[in-house]
Image (cartoon, rainbow, N blue to C red):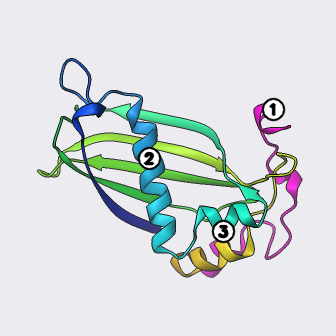
Amino acid sequence: MYSADIQLRVRYAETDQMGYVYHGNYAAYFEVARTEAFRQLGIRYRDLETQGVGMPVGELRTRFRRPARYDDLLTIRVMLKELAEGSRVNFEYEIRNEAGDLLTEGSTLMVFVSTSNGRPVPIPASVRQQLAPYFSEAEALGPLGAGRATPGDAPAPAAFGK
């Protein structure tokens, strides 16, 4: 399993009239955490895009337990409990405040796609290589074995096609 903790302080503009973080901002918090966790591994979205690979969100799930508020220092834990399979990778998140209280849980299912046609592509070898040390050999190979994933492994939702 891979995990990383990213800290983020709630800005006033991110709160609603009740002083809670507006629910729509959590997707952005997940994105910041996911991007920074990949950056810590040496994986930059910019480099993937240069290689013709994008990572749109296929699914987003958020469960609110307690509100985050203005000026809270949040710790967002990003977890990959399984290595990407075929074209998909599932990120899980936990958001805690400074007291360690669990505020929010969530997940995003990301799909690796070709930026030229929006169709699914296998997880790039460079990404698999950076993540592999955090998983057992069997998990790193995946169900199809090394290098055997095909774009048809995980059909992209229709919205991803061009």
Point out the frontmost of discs 1 and 3.
3
Report the quarter where the C terminus lies: top right
Assess disc 2: are there few (<14), some (14-19) or many (≥20) residues with their C-alpha within 10 Å of its C-alpha: many
Q: Which SS type dominates the magenta stretch?
A: loop
Q: Position of residue 52 (x, y in %)?
A: 79, 61
Q: Which residue is mark 1?
A: 158
What secondary structure is marked by label 2? helix
Q: Which residue is mark 3?
A: 47
Question: Magenta segment, which residues?
Answer: 135-162
Task: Name the kind of residue labelled 1 in the image.
Answer: Ala
Marking on residue 30: 2
Assess disc 3: are there few (<14), some (14-19) or many (≥20) residues with their C-alpha within 10 Å of its C-alpha: few
Q: Position of residue 115 (x, y in %)?
A: 79, 52
Mark 1 or mark 3, earlier in chain: 3
Does residue 31 appear left or right of residue 5 in this picture? right
Marking on residue 103: none
What secondary structure is marked by label 3? helix
- Is residue 92 depicted above or below 71 in this figure? below
Task: Name the kind of residue labelled 3 in the image.
Answer: Asp
Give the spatial CA distance, label 3 vs label 2: 20 Å
Mark 3 or mark 2, earlier in chain: 2
